[in-house]
Image (spheres, rainbow, N blue to C red):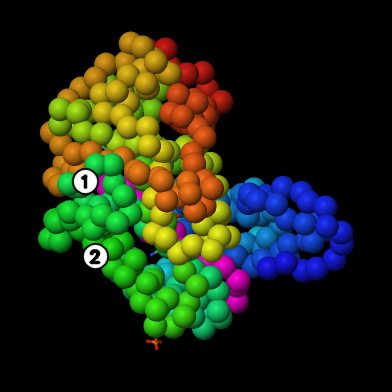
Amino acid sequence: HLAVAGHPSFRESSVGGKVPLGLRRRALRVLVTGGAGFVGSHLVDRLVERGDSVIVVDNFFTGRKGNVAHHLQNPRFEVIRHDVVEPILLEVDQIYHLACPASPVHYKYNPIKTIKTNVVGTLNMLGLAKRIGARFLLTSTSEVYGDPLQHPQVETYWGNVNPIGVRSCYDEGKRTAETLTMDYHRGANLEVRIARIFNTYGPRMCIDDGRVVSNFVAQALRKEPLTVYGDGKQTRSFQYVSDLVEGLMKLMEGEHIGPFNLGNPGEFTMLELAKVVQDTIDPEARIEFRPNTADDPHKRKPDISRAKELLGWEPKVPLHEGLPLMVADFRKRIFGDQEESTE
Ligand code: NAD
Ligand code: UDP
Ligand code: UDP
């Protein structure tokens, strides 16, 4: 992707590594499906910033125009309301395929739609990539490991997934999406990349999406009790969104297919997370226990050795630094310009 001109001194590339100075990288045309969502909109910011032309395809199920509104005046940016379950014709160099609801509450809302999005939607985007010769990156998930019997999870682990459970529209859907991606690679010579993303948080998450970080933060700000499901001893590892975006771009630009775990190995029980939220927002916030949901994985923590070694990537933002950035955004969206309630 390099257009030649210039002398052999070097500058830092925006996606890591060195590129010869004056060897300007040709601006790419990049499609981001699900680009109006939480992760997608942060990725779009970085792609636009480095000079690429970006097309977002999104059906706005869980995404919002507001997440990309700041680019609408940019002639190199375009957003198309479209459902990836339907075919589409576009001409781009790279496809980041994110379209799919990510919060358990959202993906269980219409499970048949979720599995269609993962299977038919991914098939369409692979067909598109094949027709135009674009590089294709799938955002898969740590949920492909199910309720893991190996800890931490390594990419070579095949997982422990209930194929008929309430989460399977998502986790089996993503497993099939990975299969399709590898079959297009092997069968149609498509250039593909697979990321397995672990729990990610940050500004622009849907406030009421039911995920644990968004729930706890919104609850603490609204002076409501933090709802801990089950005994609160289950674990997750929380990654700040800028670290994920960096990893996705390094994966796309690099030479390795993956799958790569992209996550922060810092592991917390839900009770420990509640404590961090209390420390950050309100030490008086109460905790309330609720019954847990079905098939909830007991623990989750990425082994990121492969991404460290082959992508030169590792997360930089620990929870106690990332959480306040998300809290500032939630505070603004929940209270607007009004004074925060003191009741
Ligand atoms: P999100 O719900 O904020 O974003 C998903 C976007 O896809 C939304 O804008 C939504 O409107 C759009 N979308 C959904 N179905 C669509 C369809 N059929 N056609 C077109 N657009 C559609 O979720 P997110 O957290 O930004 O997740 C982005 C991707 O990363 C998803 O594929 C998700 O599975 C994956 N992922 C996220 C996490 C996480 O913790 N955030 C973890 C693992 C994997
Ligand atoms: N597809 C698409 N846009 C394209 C090319 C293909 O949406 O530019 C869809 C197409 O409608 C099909 C899917 O991608 O449903 C898979 O395409 P492929 O060519 O691999 O398979 P085929 O059409 O031969 O079944
Ligand atoms: N959880 C919780 N309180 C909440 C929401 C979720 O204790 O208000 C728990 C949930 O049971 C799970 C963990 O937090 O064990 C992570 O849930 P989330 O929905 O954020 O993502 P998951 O990793 O399950 O996809």
**Residue at point 41%, 38% (across, down):** 264
**Residue at point 42%, 12% (across, down):** 342
Q: Is residue 38 left or right of residue 22?
A: left
Q: Quadrant of residue 28?
A: bottom right
Is residue 321 positioned above or below 286 on the image? below
What type of secondary structure mainly makes up the magenta span? Answer: loop
Q: Where does the image place residue 190, in percent across and percent down from the top left? A: 48, 77
Magenta range: 90-105
Q: Quadrant of the C terminus?
A: top left
Q: Quadrant of the N terminus?
A: bottom right
Along the viewing direction, whichever of 85 and 61 lies nearer the viewer: 85
Local secondary structure at mark 1: loop
Q: Dot 2: few (<14), some (14–19), or many (≥20) neighbours within 10 Å? A: few
Q: Where does the image place residue 41, in percent across and percent down from the top left? A: 54, 50
Is residue 199 positioned above or below 225 on the image? below
Residue where numbered disc 2 is placed: 112
> Marks 1 and 2, Cα distance to the nearest angstrom?
30 Å
Q: Where does the image place residue 62, in percent across and percent down from the top left? A: 40, 52
- Asked if residue 92 lies in the magenta stretch, the reply is yes
Q: Which mark is residue 150?
A: 1
